[in-house]
Structure formats: structure tokens, C-alpha cells
Amino acid sequence: MKSIGFLSFGHWANHPSYETRTAGDTLLQSIDLAVAAEQIGLDGAYFRVHHFARQLASPFPLLAAIGAKTNKIEIGTGVIDMRYENPMYMAEDAGAADLISNGRLQLGISRGSPEQVIEGWRYFGYEPAEGETDADMGRQKALSFLDKLSGVGFAQPNPQPMFPNPPGLLRLEPHSPGLRNRIWWGAASNATAVWAAENGMHLQSSTLKFDENGKPFHIQQAEQIRLYKEAWKTAGHQHEPRVSVSRSIFALVNDMDRAYFGQQGKASDSFGYIEANQRAVFGRSYAAEPDKLIKELATDEAIQEADTLLLTIPNTLGVDYNIHLLSSILEHVAPALGWK
């Protein structure tokens, strides 16, 4: 395990037990959390993107702010739903945020999952072309985004521009060299993991995936990762592939931890439906004393196959407590996983 980061869903609500009662609370605490996570030695700060929900959306202002206040920690998303995006405007925003962070963005994108509203991307002005599904639209936008990040000119310059142009076709600006090789695809199936590898994207695999053979979650996820690695090798890309998996892991080291999470550890996976006709397998949560936790995680095949572990955090409990949770993992558990 080379890298460990956190993944925040960025929830807020006017609830008496929440430290994040407004959107402003969540945004400002997300910045503080990333700064504190860097100070304790965590490798990455990642944020989920949801629309029409009291959760983090529009990620680039947040990523840019974190980039300006940190120096080393990777900053990313897990994931941006491409059905809602304008690839060109997104390439400009991503380029700016990456330059502010001095090349530390690790952007996770995806074709998207069920959202809070029906076909929410239509409210953003997008709809699939004739014969396309919304998933097709998301993947086509992803490819367009990757193309624009390459920095190759494509737009015909005005012969009488307001300001002088460089020679040739024009590209989007600001361009951040190297960002194209730091894009991740959130894959729920084996087929889309292979597609990600073919298109030179790193792989993000979450706490659920489509159930493709009835096996336990971590075994199906490990199989997905191996297929991805094989496809990457076949494609012959020049940069090294990376793979992240997300897990809910809580080391119980004091009475508060036991009160919050003592009953959270699940002994088995669960199965359900995230789409009308698509059965999914959901991975278990881990919550135990560190010694027991290490033994349980050692049997998780997908963690062994991945190089990056993203710890899902309860952001509503505030910065200080989440840093305690992350510190407990780094101190008591991570070294046994091969981290640093």
C-alpha cells in the first residue's frame, strides 16, 4: 500500500449532532481537514461530487483553495459525474486548479450513478444524442475531456484577434502539463475498468460494484483490478497505472470510537440494486481494535491489489475528530498494510 487518503462525501444538515450544519461549514472544514491531514502525513484528500443534494458539488473552487493552502498532499475527486459536465469548461477549471496546486490534482471522473433527481443532467442542459444512453453520453464527455487536456491545439484562431496569438491552432488555457496522466475512472463493472485502462486512466473502485458472479465483494473487486492491469499492459501506456479502493475503516482506540462505531463492523457483504435491473454487491465496513482490524484487512484481496486506499470519513463529526480517526489508522494499522 503506497498511499492512503481520505474520501469525504461532504454532508451537511441542520442537525444538532452535526458539526457541518451549512454548506459553508462543510466547504471551510474540508479545507481545514485537508491541511490537517497533510500535517499528520496522509497522502491524499479526496471529495465526492453530488448534485441536487446537501453535499459537495462543483469541486474546482474547493480543490483550488486546498491547493493554495497545502504543499504536498494529493487533491482529488471520487468521482465527478461527467453527464453533468461541459468538457471544455471543465478542462479550463481543472487546469487552473492543478496549476494552483503545483500539479497535485488526481481527478476521479465517471459516467455517474443514480442521483437525487430523475435525469438531473437534463436540468444542466444536456441530453444524450439519438441512440445514446446517458452512460454513453458520460463516457463520450470523458473522452472529450481527456482530449482537451492533451494540450493539442484544435480551434481556428481569429485573423484579427484582440491580443496576439501563438502560431497554429489554439488550445484551451490555462493548460497544465501532466494532468492528462492524473485522471482516474470510477468503474462499477469489469468492462468499464478495462475501458479505463485502454484509455489511459487510473482506476477508482468504490465500496460497491456490479455483481458479476456472486462472489464476495473484495474478491470481485480484486478480479476487476487484475483485469484492469492486464488491459493497461496490453495497451502499452508509458506512464504507470494506479488503482484506488475505498473502505469504511475505523480503529477503535477510545470510548468515543466505540460509542460511534462499535456496532459498525459488518461481518459480511450485502447485495442490492442501485439501478432498476442492475444488482450490486456492497462491501462490508471494518470497525475493531487495531490488532483485530489488521487481521481482517489482511484478508481483503482488493486492498492487497491496490496501491491507494481511500478511507471514507464521517465529515459531519468535524475536523478534530476526523483527524483523530485518520491518525489512529496511520499509527496503529497502516504500517501493517505496508504503508511507508
Image (tube, grey):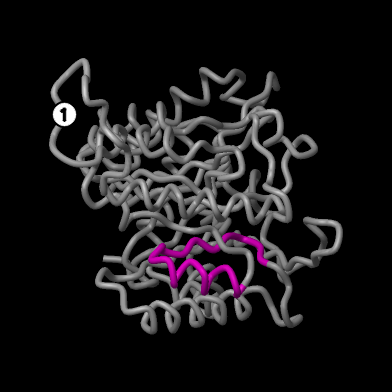
Residue drawn at x 69%, y 50% is: 134
Look at the image and give the residue range highlighted in magenta.
190-209
Instruction: Give residue 209's position: percent from left, percent from top.
Output: 66, 66
Residue projecting furthest to the front: 159
Residue drawn at x 56%, y 45% is: 82
Residue type indicated by callout 1: Asn
Residue drawn at x 38%, y 64% is: 334
Residue projecting furthest to the right: 276
Instruction: Give residue 8's position: percent from left, percent from top.
Output: 52, 42
Q: Is residue 196 highlighted in magenta?
A: yes
Quadrant in the picture for the N terminus:
bottom left
Instruction: Give residue 179's position: percent from left, percent from top.
Output: 29, 49
- Give the crowd class for mark 1: few <14, some 14-19, many >=20 residues within 10 Å: few
Instruction: Give residue 208's position: percent from left, percent from top.
Output: 66, 62
Q: Please name whichever residue, 280 or 265, is drawn nearer the observer in this view of the structure.
A: 280
Tell me which corner region of the image, top left, top right, bottom left or bottom right, holds residue 131.
Answer: bottom right
Residue drawn at x 32%, y 53% is: 180
Element assignment for label 1: loop
Q: Please name whichever residue, 258 or 52, is drawn nearer the observer in this view of the structure.
A: 52
Taking the image as shown, residue 245 lies to the left or right of residue 263, namely left
Q: Please name whichever residue, 253 or 202, is drawn nearer the observer in this view of the structure.
A: 202
Q: Is residue 134 above or below residue 197?
A: above
Quadrant in the picture for the C terminus:
bottom left
Taking the image as shown, residue 333 lies to the left or right of residue 78, namely left
Which residue corresponds to mark 1? 165
Q: Is residue 80 above or below residue 248?
A: above
Taking the image as shown, residue 15 lies to the left or right of residue 99, namely right
Q: Is residue 198 highlighted in magenta?
A: yes
